[in-house]
Image: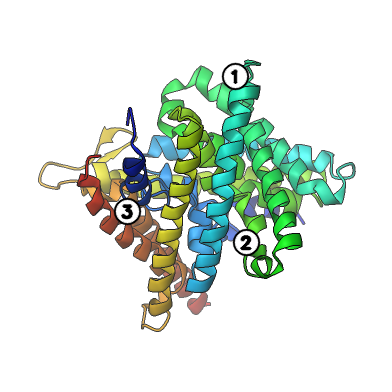
Amino acid sequence: MKKQSILANGILFENPTFVQLLGMCPTLAVTTTLQNGFGMGLSATAVLIMSNILVSALRKIIPDKVRIAAYVVIIATFVTIVQMVLQAFVPSLYASLGIFIPLIVVNCIILARAEAFASKNSVGKSALDGLGMGLGFTAALCVISTVREIIGQGTIWGISVVAAPLEPIAIIGMPPGGFIALGIIIATINAIVKKRGGNK
Amino acid sequence: MTEPTIIGLLISALFTENFVLVKFLGCCPFLGVSKKIDTAIGMGMAVTFVMAIASMFTYLANEFLLIPLNLEYLQTILFILIIAALVQFVEMVIKKTMPALYSSLGIYLPLITTNCAVLGVALLNVQNSYNLLFSILYGTFAALGFTLAIVLFAGIREQINEKDVPESFHGFPIALITAGLMAIAFMGFSGFSI
């Protein structure tokens, strides 16, 4: 596989959120504002790249039977590092993401990439795959959180964009809105993909 | 919640702070294993079982291992290891002693390791500084809340499968919107102050 196609796979064709439908919990929970979505995306990307590199480097040493446990420990280690870094340097983000930072450990995207890609490919390719998937996840979170922040609070990145006569629809920023917004976004993407496919 | 009562804990875990629909914990199995009521019940039972035991063991490990040694920052790693080991152990025990139960729950057990509700409840127990009894109860009640949500959701999805849904909404998107409407219904409980 070419290097560009590994990257493009993660960001577009096999987008972990919109196409593979993995990692739904953080996707739904933290996308209330663009800042949160972006922060979560980057944190997960960092963990994904580092864990992919280490899993790939150790792929010939880890015995097959305990590989899942080994992956989980590797991922948990990097999550703890990211958690400490966030706590030290961006305490506001640390506070608003809360419990979902340690829960990056059980984000299925990361374990899925360790199992499906990093355990079978070279270190360089695995790092690229981690970057691609991470950016795909970040992009998806940014799309969802932008939509939800504009509709739910009338702001983007905390800056007000909705003028006076329009009232923000608060429910989109609340838990039920997360499900509904994501459902409509995925349906829109399905419709666009179908239309493009039909025109060929 | 400063001094929770058992009833208060039960109601909040089941309805007002339902793990799936309000806290977004355990969404993956909620959306993934909810096409049929039978499998949803199986998954719910397996999760309840593991979450109750996991709450107990993570509490004990935190109280008697991490806090005395000042190693609280290892919480995430230790908890996920405990959960993974526990799931494996439960799987082996059930397989040996109750083959009938194993054949109905077996396939869900490995999935539970990466169910964020389990790690989530362990971390929330520590955050809320619950004692041993409340940790176990919270784990059980939260899992019952998960079961309630996933079984109701599976019931609705079975009906939707037979309806005429717009093409782009087929499958996952309509399931998400259904979940959203259920979450709105559950918001109706949030007025209760316990």
Mark 2 near mark 1, Cβ–Cβ under 8 Å?
A: no
Q: Secondary structure at mark 1?
A: loop
Q: Secondary structure at mark 2?
A: helix
CA gap between label 2 and label 3 equals 27 Å
CA gap between label 2 and label 1 equals 33 Å
- Residue B55 occupies quadrant: top right
Horizontally, residue B120 falls left or right of residue A70, namely left
What residue sits 47% from the left and 51% below the top?
B143
Mark 1 is surrounded, within 10 Å at the Cα level, by few (under 14), some (14 to 19) or many (20 or more) other residues, namely: few
CA gap between label 1 and label 3 equals 37 Å
Q: Position of residue A108 (x, y in %)?
A: 61, 50
Q: Chain of mark 2?
A: B
Which numbered marker is on residue A176? 3
Q: Chain of mark 3?
A: A
The answer to whether any part of residue A46 appears in the image is no
Relative vertical location of residue B144 with respect to residue A49 in this rendering, above or below: below
Residue that badge 2 annotates = B108
Of tags 1 and 3, the one toward the viewer is 1
- Residue A91 occupies quadrant: top left
Of tags 2 and 3, the one toward the viewer is 2
Residue that badge 1 annotates = B67
User: Are discs 2 and 3 both within one chain?
Assistant: no
A63 and A36: which one is in front?
A63
Residue type, numbered disc 1: Ile
Residue type, numbered disc 3: Pro
Mark 3 is surrounded, within 10 Å at the Cα level, by few (under 14), some (14 to 19) or many (20 or more) other residues, namely: many
User: Are discs 1 and 3 both within one chain?
Assistant: no
